[in-house]
Image (cartoon, rainbow, N blue to C red):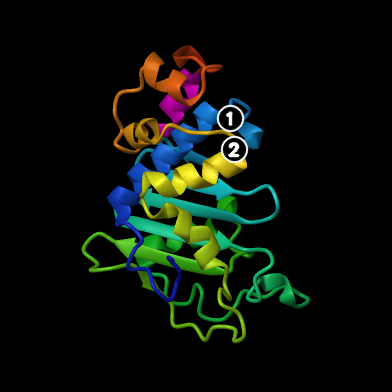
Amino acid sequence: MIATRDLSQLPGPDALRQAMQSMAMLDAILSPDWQGRYYSFNCNWSEREQMGSMRDGCGDDLHAHFGPEGCWIKGFAHESPMSPFRETPPKVWPGIYDTVPAEFAGCLKEPAFQIEAGTFCVWHRYGDPKWQVGAISYKNGSPDPDGSSKLLSPFDGMPGTYREWAEYYYECELDIEAVDNVFRHERLTSRLVNRLNPFVTLTDLEQDRREIGY
């Protein structure tokens, strides 16, 4: 499992970007209604920035910012023991943002990322040997105190991980080879789309494909 206490299985920035684009593209194919999707990706967040996100519709979310410096991720697990809303007024758990590098300072001011609602934050600058996290004293008594295992583990870059989740969430059976084709960013064809969802066409997906950058 991937968590802030062990980020060794989380792909590097470029591989993570490709995985998040793939997951967003698969969600677009499986769920024509945007409101029903878990994963999304905007390749034109700004001139030099891209943004991947996850929202489960029940209060949990994750944002991944990709830019020239690398990748910065913030997550919020609303039932986590380290939730800012564990007390009144809400207070972010000490150490989560304290050592975020200057390269990602802009992320801490971005309203879309809702910094005040965060239970974990990790980052990986190009040139860093591995993912980084702040010096945090975790809440005792929970196997996943900040919710990072729940929210980060789906991003291991493995097609089978997405397939297992999607078959449960969308209540369907998926062709693992077709899922793998999308994870490898193979050209989106009518045949490939049909293997995943026969009720969606390439034309239906054009706007999503452009936004995702697939």
Give the total of numbered labels.
Answer: 2
Query: Which sits in the foreground, 180 or 2?
Result: 180
**Crowd tier of the residue under label 2, counting other residues whose Cα lies within 10 Å: few below 14, some 14–19, many 20 or above:** many
**Amino acid on which the number 1 mark rests in the picture:** Ser
Q: Is residue 185 above or below residue 110?
A: above
**Amino acid on which the number 2 mark rests in the picture:** Arg
Q: Residue at x 29, y 49 (%)?
A: 14
The magenta region covers 205-213
Query: Which sits in the foreground, 89 or 19?
Result: 19
Quadrant location of the C terminus in the rendered image: top left
Q: Residue at x 48, y 77 (%)?
A: 98
**Residue where numbered disc 2 is placed:** 37
Query: Which sits in the foreground, 147 or 124?
Result: 147
Which element is circle 1 on? loop
Query: Which sits in the foreground, 30 or 99?
Result: 30
Asked if the magenta segment contains residue 210, the reply would be: yes
Side of 143 relative to 84 (left or right): left
Which percent across, then down, holds residue 61? 59, 54
Q: Residue at x 42, y 70 (%)?
A: 100
**Residue where numbered disc 1 is placed:** 31
Q: Identify the image quadrant of residue 23.
A: top left
Asked if the magenta segment contains residue 12, the reply would be: no
Is any atom of residue 164 visible in this view? yes
Q: Identify the image quadrant of residue 19.
A: top left
Please report contact status of discs 1 and 2: CB closer than 8 Å, yes or no: yes
Q: Residue at x 43, y 26 (%)?
A: 209
**Disc 1 to disc 2, C-alpha distance:** 6 Å
Q: Is residue 44 above or below residue 152?
A: above
